[in-house]
């Protein structure tokens, strides 16, 4: 079975070393794919991958209350739409089957733009994971590294990514 590491930008590559050192996660046998940021880039980059492939989405995420540098194993992903309620399918994420320790488990909310404020707590925010999960991959895992507390400036200082 093919195994891929899915990252939005090349600036996230440093997270592979951190995941190996801090969490004991070794993905040296996986192919690294950079998708670009956001839904359209995800769909264009991943639409032709085998849905049985094993995917590891590793990237930066914001959180309203988690400490910077916290690792989060995502258990479920939803779209971030705090102003309206509508029925969505549950998008559960595969766990790492005890391959890792030293991280929290939480929901990830994907947004179409950088989240600068939220009443949601004990979760993380990104811009890609819900779209990856919606494509129907059967073996999707996700680790997020908290880069900021909903501050684009702090995110950019750490990652030199999206402006």
Image (cartoon, grey):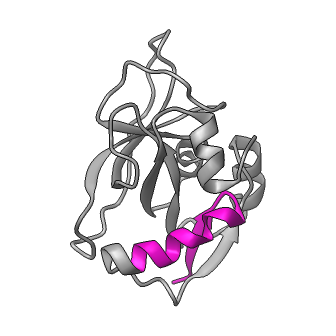
Above or below, comparing residue 45 to residue 17 in the picture: above
Q: Residue at x 52, y 90 (%)?
A: 29
Q: Answer whether residue 18 is magenta in the image.
A: yes
Q: Answer whether residue 129 is magenta in the image.
A: no
Residue 61 location (% of width, % of height): 50, 46
Above or below, comparing residue 2 to residue 122 in the picture: below
Q: Quadrant of residue 151?
A: top right
**Is 97 on the left or on the right of 34, as rendered?**
left
Magenta segment boundaries in residue numbering: 1-20
In the picture, the quarter occupied by the C terminus is: top right
In this view of the protein, can residue 143 be seen by the observer?
yes
Residue 118 location (% of width, % of height): 44, 21
Residue situated in front as seen by the camera: 85 or 128: 128
Name the residue at the bottom extreme.
Answer: 29
In this view of the protein, can residue 54 be seen by the observer?
no
Residue 83 location (% of width, % of height): 50, 9
Above or below, comparing residue 24 to residue 151 in the picture: below
Q: Quadrant of residue 78?
A: top left
Q: Residue at x 71, y 58 (%)?
A: 47
Q: Residue at x 33, y 41 (%)?
A: 66
Q: Residue at x 69, y 42 (%)?
A: 39
Q: Quadrant of residue 144?
A: bottom left
């Amino acid at each position: 079975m093919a195994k891929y590491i899915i990252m939005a930008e090349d600036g996230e590559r440093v997270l592979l070393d951190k995941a190996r050192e801090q969490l004991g996660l070794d993905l040296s046998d996986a192919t690294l794919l950079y998708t670009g940021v956001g839904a359209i880039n995800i769909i264009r980059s991943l639409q032709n991958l085998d849905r049985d492939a094993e995917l590891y989405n590793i990237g930066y995420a914001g959180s309203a209350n988690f400490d910077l540098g916290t690792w989060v194993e995502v258990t479920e992903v939803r779209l971030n739409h705090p102003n309206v309620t509508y029925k969505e399918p549950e998008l559960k994420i595969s766990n790492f089957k005890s391959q890792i320790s030293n991280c929290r488990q939480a929901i990830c909310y994907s947004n179409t733009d950088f989240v600068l404020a939220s009443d949601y707590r004990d979760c993380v925010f990104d811009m890609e994971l819900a779209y990856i999960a919606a494509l129907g991959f059967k073996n999707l895992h996700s680790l997020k590294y908290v880069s900021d507390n909903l501050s684009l400036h702090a995110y950019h200082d750490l990652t030199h990514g999206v402006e």
